[in-house]
Image (tube, rainbow, N blue to C red):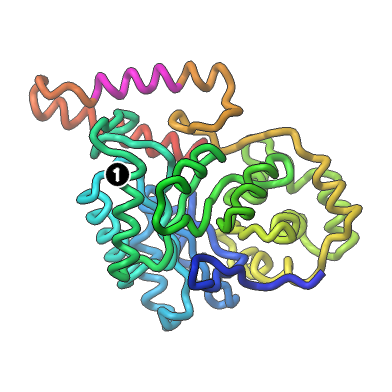
């Protein structure tokens, strides 16, 4: 089964590389080397986000690479507290500045949530995903963004955007791997002309005992094919026409991720064996997620955290310095939680 290196997105059928470099959890001092290794390997699709806190270093690596901008495919994301038009525009301008570029190839709404500016899990009743999307559409018209999309949107949330959009989402980026294939969501998006990107395509490696890289099924297939277990897991998604954005700090692994998945194909029996690993394991769980498969404990925890957040961000009557300190501490806690989950 020959696999194309690109998929087409948007009404202009732009080419999006099917393999990219993920930068989530890539710390400062390491992400620049990973970007350089990716570009050297011919993988010019870089997936970023301001909440990853490394876009400045990514931008520096891109600028020093000498790779022409037209050869790059840059994705970034809009964080949860930027839903009003002025906040959307300011966030994009910051990302463009940090990445040292005039435009993004793809800009995603990071999560289907609407927070008050500079808050964590405090709803903004005067903002909405719809208004945010309309602002993104205007940014496409202005040429600052080539394509727009969504991330972590479940099927009903995708359908809601489709009900009012002028420009259809080009991509929905969600967690996908053999233990969490989300087949119905993938099929729904693809049937509606929305391509799908898989983050955590390795099930986050060995984090939280994900076990996919050491799973006997994956290892047997890898040994038979003469490739790494990582290549097997990436190829499984790619054969579903799903884009993958594995992350790595090792130049050698980045090179393998960019090249090995194209060196073989999975047979029907092998695909069936990998499909049988499905158990619904989700490794990116955050208190503000809207997924239907959240546990009762997760929902209770979210309620507690949301209550604390409201208290922290409604202390305007408290002495200014204390209020600012509480808010800063809470935002740091939120960022740490996001990186650890």
Q: Position of residue 332 (x, y in %)?
A: 33, 36
Name the residue beneath numbered marker 1. Answer: 83
User: What percent of the width, then of the height, locates residue 177?
Assistant: 68, 47
Residue occupying image coordinates x 34% and y 65%: 140
Range drawn in magenta: 302-312
Who's the residue at 9% across and 28% down the image? 320
Q: Is residue 48 left or right of residue 284?
A: left
Q: Is residue 132 above or below residue 98?
A: above
Residue 304 on the magenta segment: yes
Apparent side of residue 334 relative to residue 243 in the rendered image (left or right): left
Which image quadrant is residue 6 in? Answer: bottom right
- Could you say where residue 183 lies in the image, as x and y percent from the top left? 70, 44
Residue 291 visible in the snapshot: yes
Secondary structure at badge 1 equals loop
Query: On the rendered structure, is 136 left or right of 271?
Result: left
- Name the residue nearer the viewer: 93 or 62: 93
The residue that appears at 80% across and 45% down in the rendered structure is 275
The x, y position of residue 294, in whole percent, is 57, 26
In the rendered view, tell whether residue 119 sits above or below residue 317: below
Residue at x 69%, y 72% (from the top left corner): 4
Asked if the magenta segment contains residue 147, the reply would be no
In this view, 245 is above or below 318:
below
Residue toward you, 186 or 231:
186
Which quarter shows the N terminus?
bottom right
């Amino acid at each position: 089964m020959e696999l194309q290196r690109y998929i087409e997105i948007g009404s202009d059928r732009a080419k999006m590389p099917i393999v990219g470099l993920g930068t989530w959890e890539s710390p400062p001092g390491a992400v620049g080397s990973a970007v350089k290794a990716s570009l050297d390997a011919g993988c010019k699709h870089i997936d970023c986000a301001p909440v990853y806190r490394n876009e400045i270093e990514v931008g520096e690596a891109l600028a020093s690479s000498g790779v022409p901008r037209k050869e790059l495919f840059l994705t970034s994301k809009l964080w949860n507290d930027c839903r009003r038009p002025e906040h959307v525009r300011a966030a994009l301008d910051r990302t463009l500045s940090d990445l040292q570029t005039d435009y993004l190839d793809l800009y995603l709404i990071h999560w289907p949530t609407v927070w008050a500016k500079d808050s964590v899990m405090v709803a903004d009743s005067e903002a909405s995903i719809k208004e945010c999307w309309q602002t993104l559409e205007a940014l496409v018209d202005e040429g600052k963004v080539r394509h727009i999309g969504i991330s972590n949107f479940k099927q009903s949330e995708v359908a809601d955007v489709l009900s009012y959009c002028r420009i259809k989402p080009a991509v929905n980026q969600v967690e996908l791997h053999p233990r969490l294939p989300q087949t119905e969501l993938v099929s729904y998006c693809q049937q509606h002309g929305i391509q799908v990107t898989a983050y955590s395509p390795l099930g986050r490696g060995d984090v939280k005992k994900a076990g996919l890289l050491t799973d006997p099924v994956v290892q047997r297939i890898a040994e038979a094919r003469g490739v790494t277990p990582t290549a097997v897991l990436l190829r499984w998604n790619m054969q579903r026409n799903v884009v993958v954005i594995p992350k790595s700090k090792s130049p050698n692994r980045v090179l393998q991720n960019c090249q090995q998945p194209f060196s073989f194909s999975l047979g029907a029996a092998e695909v069936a064996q990998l499909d049988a690993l499905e158990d619904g394991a989700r490794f990116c769980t955050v208190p503000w997620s809207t997924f239907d498969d959240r546990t009762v404990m997760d929902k209770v925890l979210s309620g507690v955290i949301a209550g604390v957040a409201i208290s922290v961000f409604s202390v305007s009557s408290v002495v200014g310095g204390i209020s600012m300190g509480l808010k800063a501490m809470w935002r740091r806690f939120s960022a740490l939680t996001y990186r650890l989950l």
